[in-house]
Image (spheres, grey):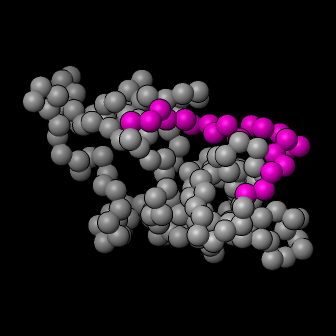
């Protein structure tokens, strides 16, 4: 369990799906259950639910990311619908224009169902089709740190998680006693 008041977070106070975090695990004295404490970003950085680029109007996001198949960028899902095969990613870097992405370029386990504001990591290449409206194309799309996105719930999801060396569920973390 994590309470938003235990998160070191700037701006809007919510955690995004697939957002990387670090935390200490303690036992809640009143319930006896595990609880996350001092939740922060990797290397104790302050969490941000909304990147600098998220709400900048399209007219002001005119810079293009450098198409480089070895460079990894971060961003979040800006627009997605289950009925279509593509979605739009807004890079986290300030001033950069959105990219088009296709679900077949997502490394995921289970149904490739992305939600608004999901954290992603991706590489960039030039658009290959006229219909993409001069937008760059994101490919090799993963969760942060290059891990596959685990979209499969339930027992099958737990099985896949164990085989793919993915992060463990909070309920399976060892207890941490702050007194020691």
Residue 115 horizontal/vertical position (percent) = 61, 53
Residue 81 horizontal/vertical position (percent) = 71, 59
Q: Nearer the viewer, residue 18 or 31?
A: 18
SS majority, magenta: loop
Drawn side of residue 124 relative to residue 165, left or right: right
Residue at 73% x, 57% y is 65
Q: Is residue 178 magenta?
A: no
Q: In this view of the protein, can residue 113 be seen by the observer?
A: no
Drawn side of residue 82 relative to residue 144, left or right: right
Seen in the picture, residue 29 relative to 43 is either above or below; the reply is above
Drawn side of residue 124 relative to residue 108, left or right: right
Residue 24 horizontal/vertical position (percent) = 27, 36
The stretch in magenta equals: 44-65
Residue at 62% x, 37% y is 50
Seen in the picture, residue 119 relative to 14 is either above or below; the reply is below
Q: On the image, which quarter does residue 55 sit in?
A: top right
Seen in the picture, residue 4 relative to 121 is either above or below; the reply is above
Drawn side of residue 18 relative to residue 93, left or right: left
Q: Is residue 48 magenta?
A: yes
User: Residue farthest to the left?
Assistant: 180
Residue at 53% x, 70% y is 107
Classify the position of the N terminus by image quarter. top left
Residue 15 horizontal/vertical position (percent) = 50, 38
Classify the position of the C terminus by image quarter. top left
Residue at 49% x, 35% y is 47
């Amino acid at each position: 369990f994590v309470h938003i008041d235990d998160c070191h977070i700037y701006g809007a106070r919510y955690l995004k799906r697939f957002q990387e975090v670090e935390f200490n695990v303690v036992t809640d004295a009143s319930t006896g259950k595990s609880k996350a404490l001092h939740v922060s970003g990797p290397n104790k950085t302050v969490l941000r639910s909304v990147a600098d680029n998220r709400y900048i109007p399209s007219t002001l996001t005119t810079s293009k990311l450098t198409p480089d198949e070895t460079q990894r960028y971060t961003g979040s899902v800006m627009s997605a619908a289950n009925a279509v095969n593509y979605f739009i990613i807004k890079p986290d870097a300030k001033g950069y224009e959105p990219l088009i992405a296709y679900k077949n370029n997502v490394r995921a386990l289970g149904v490739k169902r992305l939600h608004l504001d999901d954290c992603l990591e991706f590489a960039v290449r030039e658009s290959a089709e006229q219909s993409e409206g001069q937008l760059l194309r994101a490919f090799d799309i993963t969760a942060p740190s290059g891990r596959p996105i685990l979209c499969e719930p339930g027992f099958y999801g737990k099985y896949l998680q164990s085989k793919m060396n993915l992060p463990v569920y909070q309920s399976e973390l060892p207890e941490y006693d702050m007194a020691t």
